[in-house]
Structure formats: structure tokens, C-alpha cells
Amino acid sequence: MKAVAVRPGVKQSAFVADLPDPRLESIPNGRGVLVRTLQVGVDATDGEINEGLYGAAPKGDDKLVLGHEVFGIVEAVGPNVTHVTVGDYCTCTVRRPGPTIYDQIGRNDITSHHEYYERGINLLHGFMTEAFVDDAEFVVKVPQGLKHLGVLSEPVSVCAKGIEQAYLAQQRLQVWEPRLAFVTGAGQIGLLTTMMLRLRGLEVYTLARSRNPGLKQEIVEAYGGHYISTLDTPMEELASKVGRPDLIIEATGASHVAFEAMQVLNLNGALVWTSVTGGDHKIQNFPADKVNLEWVLGNKLLVGTVNGNRKHFAQGINDLALGEVTYPGVTERILTTPIDGLDDPQGILHELENRANLKVYVNVGTA
Ligand SMILES: NC(=O)c1ccc[n+]([C@@H]2O[C@H](COP(=O)([O-])OP(=O)(O)OC[C@H]3O[C@@H](n4cnc5c(N)ncnc54)[C@H](OP(=O)(O)O)[C@@H]3O)[C@@H](O)[C@H]2O)c1
């Protein structure tokens, strides 16, 4: 069976691997689900793994099968699986339980163990393969009517968790009714977050550098948001024009933007950091006293968020569905760059370098 794998730590090592067919019986307690892969999304994390910057092979193996964003169809289930059945569309969560108390209660997404297990990223093979098995615990059903958006299930789970974390943490205020949000970044995370915040009734400004970015701006506006180029209107100037945002979701991949966002947040506001910044960037001349004072006197909240558990996948899928009936046909415009088949691994990953591509994904099979 065909798969795309890398030699972790080796630059541009992606290659077509031959794997044994997955077996339902390899999952204990009759809880196995055999999935035929239909589509696999590709993102910057896959690119970093292929650059040798990130990722680890399963213990005892020298390769790592890529792919952590999957959409598939159930081919077989074990006798103790009830929530999906043969023929259902599905996706899978990414992180698997470690030894901490958070993992024991199904919150693998907030494990406190330093070594985490993530399919296609760290210590576990991923989904960029023709078929795979997993425990039913990690398989999430995707409704038939959403099959055209199923490959966005993982990215949307990241947004769902980020928003949920803000609202949960803001219960500290007893009443919180955010009105105005800034979303920094207009990639897949920023756009899906824009949609989800619009569904919650917020006025949303989505910020990125590009002037006239075409499709990204069209999608933001089709969701009823406002696209802002920070080259024309820096974040602080925007806040002085439209007001300080009650909620900021940061998703640019640029750590200096994360800190810049600290300087515009409203009183009692929440700032959510999602960017994974693997570099060594330093900030000079940060107004530390001023920001510290404003954050203390303004009772402000900063929360970092990563990954999502099955509850966040389910919430994200609900939002994809509501988004589809509220803004028909908009979300599928994010799916810019389909690639057919697994035969050209470097070609697949090369597509990540084209900034015009919003979502690169591989068509692995057909339903
Ligand atoms: N926490 C998690 O679990 C999780 C999961 C997935 C992804 N992420 C992270 O989320 C971030 C966004 O992911 P993505 O896939 O949406 O990325 P992406 O497609 O690369 O989008 C990044 C966006 O940010 C904008 N941007 C970049 N630098 C900027 C700057 N200095 N100022 C203003 N805008 C800037 C880019 O547009 P311009 O080029 O026009 O500025 C682009 O719209 C990444 O850091 C990724 O690692 C986190």
C-alpha cells in the first residue's frame, strides 16, 4: 500500500513508501475502525517536517508517514464500535494519549507530558496513505452533506479550540459579550476563524500584510468580515479607528505580531495565540512597562492553544455546517490546490511555497 513518508531530520526526504495493509485486529477491544483515505490536507507543519526541522519517526522505525489532516470513508469496524459504520465519512484527531491525568480524561490536546504522540508529526505514522486503522475513540464522523469540506476538519478543530478556550477562560468575568474581534492572519486558520466568529455575531477585522490579496479578501468579505492590509493600516492604527478589540485570535506564524496584538487588546479582552513559531526571532524596543501596566489594570487574558480533541473536531464540523448554510459556497473556495495521488511527494510539498495557494490537499481515493 502506497504512502508518503520522510526520514525525519533529513532535508527534503519525502518519498513514496510501501506499507503493509492495515489490519482492523491491530486495534484492541474490538474498537478498530478501518478507513480508506479520500483526501489529506497539507500544511506548513508537513513542510517543516520535510525540511528536517521537526517530527520524529515511531520508535524502532527510520521513517515517518506524513499527514495529519484526513478525510476518509469507513471500510470496516470492530464489534464494539457504534458511532460510525461502514460507508460513513470521517476524520481523525491527531494526538494520542500520553501518561498524564489530562490524557486519562480524554484531553490529550493539553497533555503535560513533554513527549507527545501525534499522527504524521511525532512518533506515530500519519494518514498520507491509501488506508489506515485507528481506535474508534479518535474517529469523528463527518456528515454526508459536508463531504466537499471534510478535509478542513482538522484545521477547523484548531480554530474551534482557540475560540472555545477564550470563551471558557472569560467565564472569569461572569459576563463577557465580545463585540469586536481582530483575526491576525488570512491563511486557512485565519479565514476559518473569521467565519466562526461571524457565526457568533462578532464584527471581525482580518489582518494580513498583502495588499489586494484577491481570493483571501473575497472570502473574508463573503463571511461579512473586513480585510485589512497591515502595510496600509497597522494594527494600532486600525484599533484607533474602529476601537480596541475584545478578542484577538493570532494566526500569522509571526511572533512579533503576537506581541503587537498585546498592545491593542481592549479592557477585559482575550488574546489567543495559535502561531507555531519555530525560529529564534527577538523583539527590540517592546514597550514592556506600558503593556504590563495596561494588562494588569485592564484585567486582560492571554491564552496559548494547540491541537484539538474530538470535542473540538465535532464543534468545528458543526461550524462548517452552519457556515455552509449561512455563507453558501464560500468555505470551499479555501480549497485552492488539489493534487491527484501520492506519486510525487516533493511536488505535493512544493505547492506550500506558493503563497497564492490557500489549501493544498491530496486526492488519495474516490468515494
Ligand atoms: N496551534 C495550533 O494547533 C495550530 C494548528 C495549525 C496551524 N497553526 C499555526 O497557525 C498559523 C497560521 O496557520 P495557516 O495555515 O493559516 O498559515 P498561512 O496559510 O501561512 O497563513 C498565514 C497568514 O498570516 C499572514 N501573515 C504572515 N506574516 C504576517 C505579518 N508579519 N503580519 C501580518 N500578517 C502576516 C499571511 O498573509 P500575508 O503574507 O499577506 O501577510 C497569511 O495570511 C501558523 O503559525 C501555524 O503554524 C497552529
Image (tube, rainbow, N blue to C red):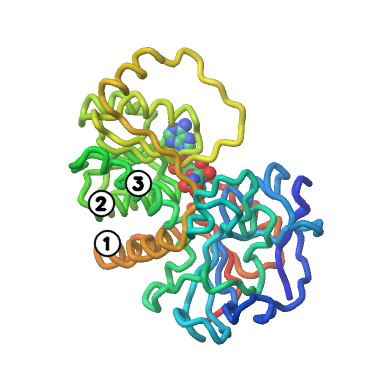
Asked if 269 appears above or below 148 in the picture, the reply is above
The percent coordinates of residue 171 (x first, y second) are 26, 43
Label 1 SS: loop
Q: Is 276 left or right of 56, judged from the image as shown? A: left
Which is in the foreground here, disc 1 or disc 2?
A: 2
Q: What residue type is labelled 3?
A: Gln
Q: Residue at x 28, y 53 (%)?
A: 223
Q: Label 3, on which residue? A: 217
Q: Quadrant of residue 271?
A: top left
Q: Is 280 left or right of 244, judged from the image as shown? A: right
Q: Is 312 left or right of 38, judged from the image as shown? A: left
Q: What residue type is labelled 2?
A: Arg
Q: Are marks 1 and 3 in contact (CB under 8 Å)?
A: no
Label 3 SS: helix
Task: Tell me if I can see residue 34 in this picture.
Answer: no
Specify which label sits upstream in the sequence, 1 or 3. Answer: 3
Q: Residue at x 32, y 16 (%)?
A: 293
The residue closer to the viewer here, 75 or 129, is 75
Mark 3 neighbour class, 10 Å CA radius: few under 14, some 14 to 19, many 20 or more: many
> Is the CB–ligand 1 distance for label 3 below 8 Å?
no
Q: Are marks 1 and 2 in contact (CB under 8 Å)?
A: yes
Mark 1 neighbour class, 10 Å CA radius: few under 14, some 14 to 19, many 20 or more: some
Q: Residue 198 carries which label?
A: 2
Label 2 SS: helix
Q: Is 153 left or right of 28, judged from the image as shown? A: left
Which is in the foreground here, disc 3 or disc 2?
A: 2
Specify which label sits upstream in the sequence, 3 or 2. Answer: 2
Asked if 226 appears above or below 120 in the picture, the reply is above
Q: Label 1, on which residue? A: 327
The percent coordinates of residue 234 (x first, y second) are 35, 26
The percent coordinates of residue 291 (x first, y second) are 35, 19
- Mark 3–mark 2 Cα distance, whole angstroms, equals 15 Å
